[in-house]
Image (cartoon, coloured by chain):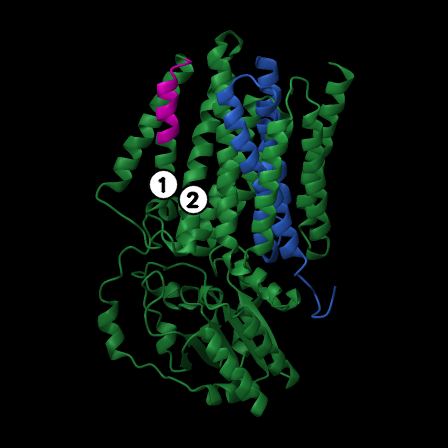
Chain colours: A blue, B green
Amino acid sequence: MTETLLAALYIFVVAMFLGFAVITKVPPLLHTPLMSGSNAISGITIIGALIVTGRQEGWLQTVLGFIAIILAMINVVGGYLVTDRMLQMFKRKPGEK
Amino acid sequence: MSVREVLIALAYMVASACFVIGLMWLQSPKRARAGNLLSSLGMLLAIVATLFVSGIKDYTMIIIGALIGSAVGAIMARTVQMTAMPQMVGLFNGFGGGASALVAAAEFFKYAADPGALTVDVSITIMLALIVGAVTFSGSMIAAGKLQGIVNERPITYPYQNFINLIFFLTIVAAAVFLVINFGHPWVFLYLTIASLIFGVLFTIPIGGADMPVVICFLNALSGVAAAMAGFVIKNNALIIAGSLVGASGVILTQIMCWAMNRPITNVLFGAFGAVVTAGSSATATTKTVRPIQADEAAILLAYAQLVIIVPGYGMAVSQAQHAVRQLADELAKRGVTVKYAIHPVAGRMPGHMNVLLAEANVPYDQLYDMDQINDEFQNADVALIVGANDVVNPAARYDKSSPIYGMPILNADHAKQIIVLKRSMNPGFAGIENELFYNEKTRMLFGDAKESLTKLINEVKNI
């Protein structure tokens, strides 16, 4: 167990730093799409929800997982769509597509 | 490891790379949309790969749940008004956190039935994912409720608030530690869940509407942390990577917002800012004079200016005036006036709120300037037009040590040759702070709803 835990911690810390490095460079202009887009990414927990629901290890787990799927899916689909909707509005020139 | 497991692991790796590249492309508006698409494809890949994980026996519930969630998410994303974006992001934060908490709960019951398979790291991360996820969920619901106006936007306070919240938090920690040592005990787990949900509420209600940008960012970070913790529980690297990226993003945005208000995060979260209207300010106000202006006169000032800097604030969002702002700017541009927009980092109710609204109104983004880019230009501006902004242009922040916003970096609107303020009435802004810019001898006040005033201005400018 310690080996997998250490590897996971390793990834956690490195990914944090990677996140800091990448996100500091996002201009304030795009901070709202950054929030909604990263929000959609946090819907990654859908993976856990799918596994928990699909393995059918008891009604309680299935119910919890089912609700988790709905919530995470709203987060993923809604987050990406609304980010796209916002980003397509940012134009350099008035008529630009 | 079977071939299938290797392929699934590789798919998660590609998905994680897509998330990182997607965020990198957000560095410029040109590639941002493609980045978001790439990130969503990564998510799709991760979801499809998960369907092949061995042990998944039944797809009925999965399909039903995914369809419901997708439909609700799509409808929300399509119909939400851009002015309501902060609430929407708040809700989504909550859903993400809630989903992570539910996954942790399901894992708890799995291990409760089979304690032999449990290791300490799993039990610890189950508790963390549950607590963080549940706090994110209920806290986000309250934050969204405040932004929507369903929950009182003013800070809700009671005696010994921070002390009571602290005690409450300690019972949560105690319950979590107890469960790690003695796994099982569904009633303690139930207490932990409910207490975490209540704590999310207690923690959010004392925070005022003007501080919501910070809270939304903070909850954003928490939703990422919850996902990462869930990743530790189910031992999935994609969750850990994606969760920590979001966590990092939320932390950075929280930090930027706090810098922009010159207040430490602790003050924002525990200070109940805006609860008390500063005493004495009303007394000084009566001795000062305000200089009103009518639309026709204001239109002349604007039409014959060379440089006009527009300072939008939350009032523009409330009055849905972003399109009228753009139309006025267009009319001025036709007359050869240069129009620029000055965006304060905490203008509005979430980071970048004003940029999105103005982009919606088709304002080209190279006319939108950050505070640092434009502050030196105000002295060359003939008119600074304040549309629903208040605290972010209050010069008291520079020198008045007794002011609650002392030290906050502000837009130098008072350096402009003339200042026109569009404002509904002389009521002080959200934080209840008197704004001395309104009494400046260069300032003229155009009273009324921002959108109506702008419409009048547009017509007057056309008639000149």
Q: Which residue is mark 1?
A: B201
Residue in the foreground of this view, choosing between B203 and B193: B193
Neighbour tally class for label 2: few under 14, some 14-19, many 20 plus, Cα within 10 Å: many
CA separation in Å, label 1 and label 2: 8 Å
Span of residues in magenta: B183-194
The stretch drawn in magenta includes residue B193: yes
Q: Amino acid at mark 1?
A: Val
- Looking at the picture, does residue A41 appear above or below residue B195? below
Residue most extreme to the bottom:
B464
Query: Disc 1, disc 2: CB below 8 Å?
Result: no
Q: Which residue is mark 2?
A: B141
Report if residue B156 is visible in the image. Answer: yes
Which part of the image, by quadrant, shows the N terminus of chain B? top right
The stretch drawn in magenta includes residue B369: no
Residue name at image x 22 percent, y 66 percent: B280
Provide residue B66's location: percent of width, then percent of height. 61, 36
Q: Secondary structure at mark 1?
A: helix
Residue in the foreground of this view, choosing between B401 and B270: B270
Neighbour tally class for label 1: few under 14, some 14-19, many 20 plus, Cα within 10 Å: many
